[in-house]
């Protein structure tokens, strides 16, 4: 696991326990709160995050965000019992229905404890923490329950799994809605963009994701450099052809 500063008020914890992926958890510190964006694969993965929080300040409120329902972003929720955990309302529903199933199918990736701990606060469109300059908003794309966070102080966009390099992962066949969510990102004029599996994204990565999705929906032919990209691309094609 590596810790990197990504903004004046934020660090990324990057984990490499899952093959093919680096997965990021973000910690944003504001004057009175910590925002933990995603919780990776269990309580052991959350230990360094909690250590950093306790080292910096014991008096600030901790707010946990689940960007979407996938197991590699939520299993560490068990480390935050009694804290507020926020997600989209669909995310909570999916987690309630699929927590055990996701654990069964990906058991080898559990780090420490990963028992079911659902979000206790949900929303439909957005939640704004005005004093903190933190906005959470609905951004369906990668999955139908995906949310994003924008930090108005540092102009950092936390895009969940909606953006990813070298190729985005489409797990929901509503491509029009995905493109709409990506175009909405541009309205925030982010200075920095980070995501669940990629750091250092730029506005041009939003444009190329939009282009890729358009091509995908038109059946355009793409060429890729790596087997990994080809594999994900074929998965994306079969996903959008699902009725
Ligand atoms: Zn995901």
Image: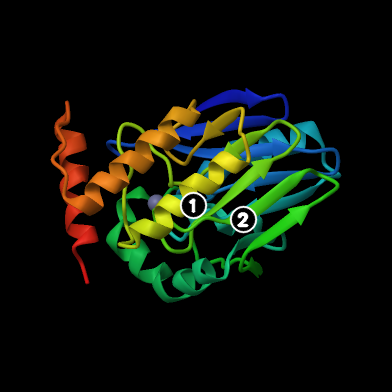
Q: Is residue 94 above or below residue 232?
A: below
Kindly identify the residue that appears in the image at 46 percent across and 53 percent down: 180
- Rendered-image quadrant of the C terminus: bottom left
Please name the residue shown 53% across and 70% down the image.
92
User: CA–CA distance between discs 1 and 2?
Assistant: 10 Å
Residue on which disc 1 sits: 181
Query: Does residue 207 appear left or right of residue 230 in this picture?
Result: right
**Mark 1 vs ligand 1: CB below 8 Å:** no
Report the front residue among 52 and 187. 187
Left or right, residue 242 beside residue 187? left
Asked if marks 1 and 2 touch (Cβ < 8 Å), the reply is: no
Locate residue 29, reporting x and y percent.
74, 37
Relative to 175, say whether 162 is above or below: above
Residue 11: % across, % down: 62, 30
Residue 140 seen anywhere in this rendered image of the structure: yes
User: Closer to us: mark 1 or mark 2?
Assistant: 1
Closer to us: 93 or 208: 208
Count of picture labels: 2
As helix, strand or loop, the secondary structure at mark 2 comes to strand
Question: Is 63 left, or right, of 233 in this rendering?
Answer: right
Q: Position of residue 215 (x, y in %)?
A: 24, 45
Q: Which mark is residue 137?
A: 2
What percent of the width, then of the height, locates residue 80?
65, 56
Secondary structure of the residue carrying tag 1 is helix
């Amino acid at each position: 696991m590596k810790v990197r500063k990504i903004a004046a008020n934020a660090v990324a914890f990057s984990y490499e326990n899952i093959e093919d992926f680096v997965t990021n958890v973000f910690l944003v510190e504001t004057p009175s709160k910590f925002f933990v964006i995603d919780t990776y694969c269990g309580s052991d993965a959350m230990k360094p995050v909690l250590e950093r929080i306790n080292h910096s300040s014991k008096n600030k409120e901790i707010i946990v965000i689940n960007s979407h329902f996938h197991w590699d972003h939520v299993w560490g929720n068990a480390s935050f019992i009694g804290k507020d955990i926020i997600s989209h309302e669909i995310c909570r529903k999916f987690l309630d229905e699929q927590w055990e199933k996701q654990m069964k199918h990906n058991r080898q990736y559990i780090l420490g404890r990963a028992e079911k701990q659902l979000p206790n606060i949900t929303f439909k469109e957005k939640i704004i923490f005005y004093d903190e300059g933190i906005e959470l908003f609905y951004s369906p794309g990668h999955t139908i329950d995906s949310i994003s966070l924008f930090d108005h102080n540092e102009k950092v966009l936390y895009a969940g799994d909606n953006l990813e390099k070298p190729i985005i992962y489409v797990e929901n066949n509503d491509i029009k809605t995905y493109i709409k969510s990506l175009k909405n990102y541009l309205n925030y004029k982010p200075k920095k963009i980070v995501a669940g599996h990629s750091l250092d994204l730029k506005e041009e990565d939003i444009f190329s994701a939009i282009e890729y999705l358009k091509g995908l929906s038109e059946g355009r032919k793409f060429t890729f450099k790596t087997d990994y990209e080809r594999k994900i691309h074929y998965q994306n094609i079969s996903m959008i052809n699902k009725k």
